[in-house]
Image (cartoon, rainbow, N blue to C red):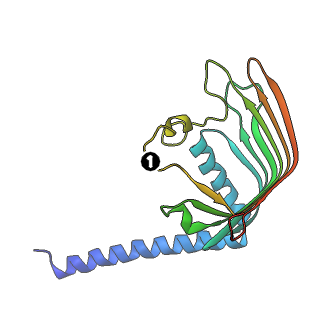
Amino acid sequence: MVSARAVRILLSCVAAVLFLLIAATAVTLAIAHYQPQRIAPLIEELASAYLGRQVRLGELSALKLGRVSYVQVRDISVANASWADTPEMGRADRILLRLDLPSIWGEGPIQVQDLEVDSLHLDLQARQDLPPNWHFLFADGASDEEDQGSADVPFAVVFESAALRDIRTRYRDADLDVVSVISELALSLKDDGV
């Protein structure tokens, strides 16, 4: 039989751990709100580990966590595959993402309220002997190509509004070297779905 003293000690330890977790969360949220740039190295590390490629953020200029959360980064880049002949697969001068945070954990699609991208430059390369450079090795060890054959519900994102400006994409493989330039691309969904 467990003594009352042991139960009190156990409950005190559990309460202390919960308090520390709540305090750490509160401090992290306060730093994220008042000094978002201090969170940038953590985001870089997590994104790099998840994608299996180096991700760099020049500046995390805005971050708000809540039901509707947003993040704005400047000078973001993603490293290219090790076999590629250029160091960066992609770069953008600015990305603003505003989304319904609870939709990330829900069963339905992720609800992106607004996406703005300025000066997006992509260098897409494909080789016959290796997966193309836009296939990432995710933290769970599976590539995005392997995930496509899964019986799970497909990954879905719904954009209410998106604006992409100054998009430059270069695609290269053994036979092609194609460059496309789009000065502006906008999408807006109204209540009637148009």
- Quadrant into which the C terminus falls: bottom right
- Residue placed most toward the observer, 25 or 129: 129
> SS class of the residue under badge 1?
loop
Q: Residue at x 74, y 17 (%)?
A: 174
Q: Residue at x 42, y 43 (%)?
A: 151
Identified by mark 1, the residue type is: Asp
Image spot of residue 130 (x, y percent): 61, 22
- Relative side of 19 to 55, left or right: left
In the displayed image of the protein, which residue is found farthest to the left?
Answer: 1
**Residue that carries the numbered disc 1 in the rendered image:** 152
Task: Check the image and report above or below for 53 versus 6.
Answer: above
Residue depicted at x 76% and y 18%? 175
Q: Is residue 54 above or below residue 71?
A: above
The residue located at (55%, 68%) in the rendering is: 102
Q: In this figure, what is the number of numbered marks?
A: 1
Neighbour tally class for label 1: few under 14, some 14-19, many 20 plus, Cα within 10 Å: few
Q: Quadrant of residue 94?
A: bottom right
Residue 65 in view here:
no
The reply, left or right, for residue 64 in relation to residue 58 is: left
- Whether 145 is drawn above or below 126: the answer is below
Place of residue 183 in the rendered image (x, y in percent of width and height, measured from the top left): 90, 48
Q: Position of residue 56 (x, y in %)?
A: 73, 47
Instruction: Name the spot of residue 65 as percent of width and height, x first.
Output: 63, 70
- The front one of 177 and 43 is 177
